[in-house]
Image (cartoon, grey):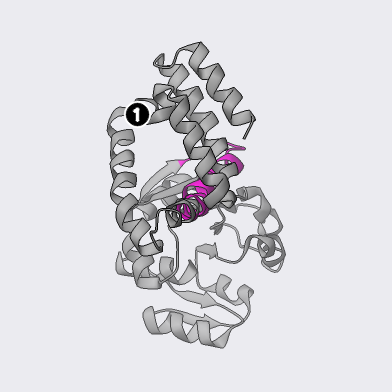
């Protein structure tokens, strides 16, 4: 993330003056992509060269690394964790400094892809009120959409992000497991069900989540759901628990829309409980 942001900020015209990493290879790679940046092994060395520090380290290391820094008056420090609040940076602060968090909702597997993916992505901002306008400007400079989170909102925001990223991949894996029972390999499952996933997302974006719900659970088709459960017990038992959990949410959505009568909803829940 640090390398991707350094490249993106530099290309957007913001001066990226220094980088610190204990890994010499990472320092060399960063300066190869951002030649104007000086490279340092120890994190404290960057403080004499910059006004704003981005701390791009694993969540468990943020407080420790922040404790190795002591900001000067007028400086600011930001971390890129999606789960932790800006308050974890308190060990680095001094009088007249500020702190915040800047979390791009981007999966970073490749630097150039991540820089490209910043365009149109959401960046969640949280921290000192005086710092947030600058962080919003930085987000917009790299093509992202800044969103301010309320105090205490980071954990819920990040849990939803995990469901949208790793959780969705887990759902894809379950889809592929069930599809193997129909004779499809992973590539075949993605080719068959990928368009349906994209259609469902487009419907949710245009109609709302509840209105986008379709399928046998929304209709109350107990026989169809019973056949699904039987097939999954035989062919894809590893995905059965996920199917049941999602089915309960679908039933609640259909009830909320008023399209699923209470007696049908009750029979569906009894069927799922017996699975």
Q: Find residue 69 and report its image quarter.
A: bottom right
* Main SS category, magenta section: helix
Judge by depth and name the residue closer to the eye, 253 or 222. Answer: 222
Instruction: Name the residue: 54% across, 29% down.
Output: 248
Q: Is residue 172 magenta?
A: yes
Mark yes or no: residue 118 visible.
no
Above or below, 201 relative to 188:
above
Span colored in magenta: 148-173
Quadrant where the C terminus lies? top right
- Determine if residue 5 is in view: yes
Relative placement, left or right, of 31 versus 240 is left
Q: Is residue 92 left or right of residue 34?
A: right
- Which of the 4 image quarters holds residue 217? top left
In this view, 229 is above or below 58 = above
Task: Please give the name of the residue rendered at 47% of the width and 17% of the height, measured from the top-left corner.
Answer: 255
Query: Which residue is depicted at the point 51% across and 18% down?
Result: 265
* Residue 14 painted magenta: no
Mark 1 sits on what residue? 208
Q: At which x and y percent is residue 3?
A: 45, 72
Local SS, label 1: loop
Q: Position of residue 251 (x, y in %)?
A: 49, 25
Is disc 1 surrounded by few (<14), some (14 to 19) or many (20+) residues within 10 Å?
few
On the image, the x and y values in percent for residue 138 come to 38, 55
Give the mark count: 1
Foreground: 111 or 67?
111
Residue 180, given in percent of the width and then of the height, sits at: 44, 57
Using the image as rendered, state which of residue 65 and residue 194 is in the foreground. 194
């Amino acid at each position: 993330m640090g390398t991707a942001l350094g490249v993106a900020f530099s290309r957007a015209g913001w001066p990226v003056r220094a980088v610190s990493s204990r890994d010499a290879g990472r320092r060399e790679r960063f300066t190869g992509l951002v030649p104007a940046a000086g490279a340092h092994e120890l994190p404290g060395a960057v403080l004499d060269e910059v006004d704003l520090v981005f701390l791009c380290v694993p969540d468990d290391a943020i407080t420790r690394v922040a404790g190795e820094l002591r900001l000067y008056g007028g400086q600011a420090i930001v971390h890129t964790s999606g789960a932790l609040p800006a308050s974890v940076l308190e060990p680095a602060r001094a009088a007249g400094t500020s702190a915040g968090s800047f979390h791009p909702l981007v999966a970073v597997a490749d630097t150039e892809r991540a820089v490209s993916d910043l365009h149109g992505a959401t960046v969640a901002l949280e921290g000192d009120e005086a710092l947030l306008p600058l962080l919003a400007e930085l987000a917009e400079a790299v093509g992202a959409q800044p969103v301010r989170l309320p105090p205490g909102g980071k954990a819920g925001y990040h849990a939803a992000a995990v469901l949208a990223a790793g959780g969705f991949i887990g759902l894809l894996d379950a889809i592929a497991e069930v599809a193997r029972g129909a004779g499809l390999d992973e590539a075949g499952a993605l080719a068959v069900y990928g368009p349906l996933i994209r259609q469902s997302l487009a419907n949710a974006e245009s109609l709302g989540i509840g209105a986008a719900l379709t399928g046998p659970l929304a209709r109350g088709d107990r026989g169809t759901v019973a056949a699904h459960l039987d097939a999954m017990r035989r062919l894809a038992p590893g995905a059965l628990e996920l199917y049941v959990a999602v089915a309960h949410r679908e039933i609640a959505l259909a009830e909320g829309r008023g399209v699923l009568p209470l007696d049908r909803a009750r029979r569906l829940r009894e069927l799922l409980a017996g699975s």
